[in-house]
Structures are given as C-alpha cells and as structure tokens.
Image: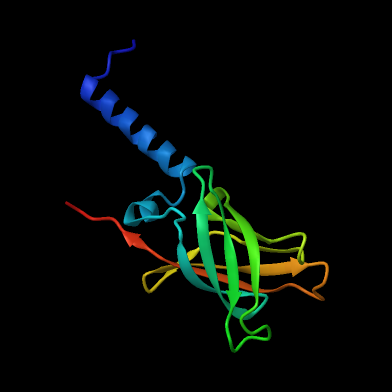
Amino acid sequence: MNRPRPLGSVLAAACFFIAAAMFIVSPGVARAEEYDFVMRPGIYAGQWHGDQVRFIVEEVAGDGTFSGVVHFDKSSRFPDALFVFTGEMGGHRSITIKRDPNNDPQVSKAREPVREKGDLIWHGETTGADLDKAYPFELRIPIEEKRHE
C-alpha cells in the first residue's frame, strides 16, 4: 500500500534535486559569485605572440563583442607598433581576439581565465598565416569584487 509522504520530506527532496541540477548545469557558479566580470572599456596588460602589449578596449557591446587597439611595448620586437582588433567573449568565459584582417590576420584564443592576485588572466595562443607556430597570448583584467552590503 502506498502511503502519502509528509509534505516536508517531499519539499526537501525537491529542493535537493533542484540544487543538484543547478550545480551540474552551471559549473563555476560559486566562483561567479565571488566577482562580477563583464568586459569594459579600459587599458589592460597582456601579450600578443609573446611580446608585451597593452589592450586598449574602446567599445563594448551587450552581445559580448568588443573592439580597440593593441599597443606594443617600447621594449618589444615591435616598439610602439599599433593594430586594431575585434574580440568576443565565448562560453565559459573564453575569449577570442582577432587582429585587423586587412593588416595582418592573426587570432588569439584562450579558454576560461584563472584568478591571480586580483586579476582575471586569459592564457592562450596567437596563430596566423605569417607565424611559423602558435605563440603565447595573455590578457590581464582586474576583477571587480562584489560588495556585500
């Protein structure tokens, strides 16, 4: 004979299954609660094919795309060189940045960033038709800590 279960145990089981499903479907939820990340205009340190650069993000759209200029460091192999880029945020906070295809088509890609000393850091690779191999890519953006009020 099937006896009805107490309402409290049914609700507890339902809450457990909902919480478990949210955890499985949304990896990284706990980390997302530690900080808010959205691409925003600014100047950020990084590397383009292993050379030190500054990413100058000028425009950011609501769909995860952004654009700006890369400025090579004075001490790089290309002192003070500039190029225009477009970029986009992908799933799991991945990032893709493309150099102006009319200038010198190169692409940098990186998976989810790591958190290090107050920064989100994307480590990836830059590839292009004129490059003999994949070279290091890096982008560092300061984390905006959530305020607990």
**In this rendering, is residue 21 above or below 123?**
above
Q: What percent of the width, then of the height, locates residue 34? A: 33, 57
Q: Residue at x 53, y 42 (%)?
A: 63
Q: Quadrant of the N terminus?
A: top left
Q: Quadrant of residue 108?
A: bottom right
Question: Horizontal and vertical percent for residue 117?
Answer: 37, 74
Question: Across the whole image, how many numbered discs are drawn on residues?
Answer: 0
Q: Nearer the viewer, residue 70 or 50?
A: 70
Q: Nearer the viewer, residue 138 or 98?
A: 98
Above or below, 125 relative to 30? below
Q: Residue at x 69, y 69 (%)?
A: 126
Give the percent coordinates (x, y) of residue 84.
64, 63
Look at 68% across and 83% down and name the residue there: 78
Specify the color scheme: rainbow
- The answer to whether residue 83 is left or right of residue 149 is right
Residue that extends furthest to the left in the rendered view of this protein: 149
> Is 13 displayed left or right of 149 in the figure?
right
Q: Residue furthest top?
A: 1
At horizontal 63% and vertical 56% (from top left) the residue drawn is 86
Which of the 4 image quadrants contains residue 122? bottom right
Residue 142 at x, y percent in the picture: 40, 67
Q: Nearer the viewer, residue 61 or 3?
A: 61
Instruction: In the rendered view, tell whether residue 120 sits above or below residue 63.
Output: below
